[in-house]
Every structure is written in structure tokens, then in C-alpha cells.
Image (spheres, grey):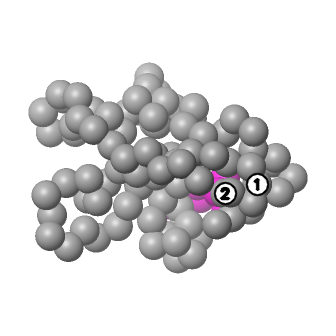
Amino acid sequence: MALLKAGCRKIFLDGSFVTEKTNPGDFDACWDCIGVDNAKLNPVFLDFSDGRKKQKKMYQGEFFPTHLSADGILPFLGFFQIDKDSGLAKGIICIKL
């Protein structure tokens, strides 16, 4: 995986993969920046242009750095842990690479 080659050790999975949907459509993920060598990081992981079109084409999902602000207040790691409909806390999946 490209993030592992750049030194990333954890990604966090959200989106329809952490719901009760039988056939999830896509995924949203955030990646831990600690230990990542930006020189080895594929630029697609920092390309948020055009609705993250390049990420979706390459991976059929979207990736965000954990510390980047998702809504102007919360970083993605915290944002992913709040249910968008109820506002209550929810679980996400941590994958150790």
C-alpha cells in the first residue's frame, strides 16, 4: 500500500463500510501522519481538488490526513467518530499497517 511505503502506520475507516449497509458504496478514510515521509507520499493523498476525483478514481474512496480540519472545528479523526444524523458518538475502524 502506498501509505505504508511512505511510513504511515495507521488508517481509520469510515463511511458506509462502518454502517449496516449490505453493499457499501465507497469509503472515507483518514491516515495518521506520524512517521510519514512526505517525499515518499503519493501526491494523490494530498490532492483534494475537484471533489477528490483523483483519489476516488485510484482507490474508489477518499483519504484525509487525521489532523486536517473536516468541518472547520474537528479534525477528521474526531469528525469520523460522530454520527452525522444523530450527533452521537460512533465507532470507526482502525487498521494498523
Question: CB under 8 Å between callouts 1 and 2?
Answer: yes
As drawn, the residue found furthest toward the right would be 39
Residue 35: percent from the left, percent from the top? 75, 39
- Neighbourhood count class around disc 1 (C-alpha, 10 Å): few under 14, some 14–19, many 20 upward: some
Quadrant placement of the N terminus: bottom right
**40 and 85: which is toward the camera:** 40
Residue type for callout 1 = Ala
Q: Which residue is mark 1?
A: 6
> What residue is shown at x 57% (from left), y 32% (from top)?
67
Whether residue 50 is visible, yes or no, is: no
Locate residue 36 relative to residue 55 in the image: left or right.
Answer: right
Magenta-span inclusion, residue 14? no
Label 1 sits on a secondary structure element that is loop
Whether residue 89 is visible, yes or no, is: yes
**68 and 10: which is toward the camera:** 10
Q: Which residue is mark 2?
A: 3
- 13 over 77 or under it: above or below: below
- 86 over 15 or under it: above or below: above
Residue 78: percent from the left, percent from the top? 40, 29
- 54 over 68 or under it: above or below: below
- Neighbourhood count class around disc 2 (C-alpha, 10 Å): few under 14, some 14–19, many 20 upward: many
> What residue is shown at x 75% (from left), y 44% (from top)?
36
Q: Which residues are magenta?
A: 44-51
Q: CA distance from mark 1 to mark 2?
A: 5 Å
Locate residue 10 relative to residue 89 in the image: left or right.
Answer: right
* Residue 49 position by quadrant: bottom right
Residue 29: percent from the left, percent from the top? 46, 52
Label 2 sits on a secondary structure element that is helix
Residue type for callout 2 = Leu
**14 and 35: which is toward the camera:** 35
> What residue is shown at x 81% (from left), y 48% (from top)?
38
Magenta segment, prevailing SS (helix, strand or loop) = helix
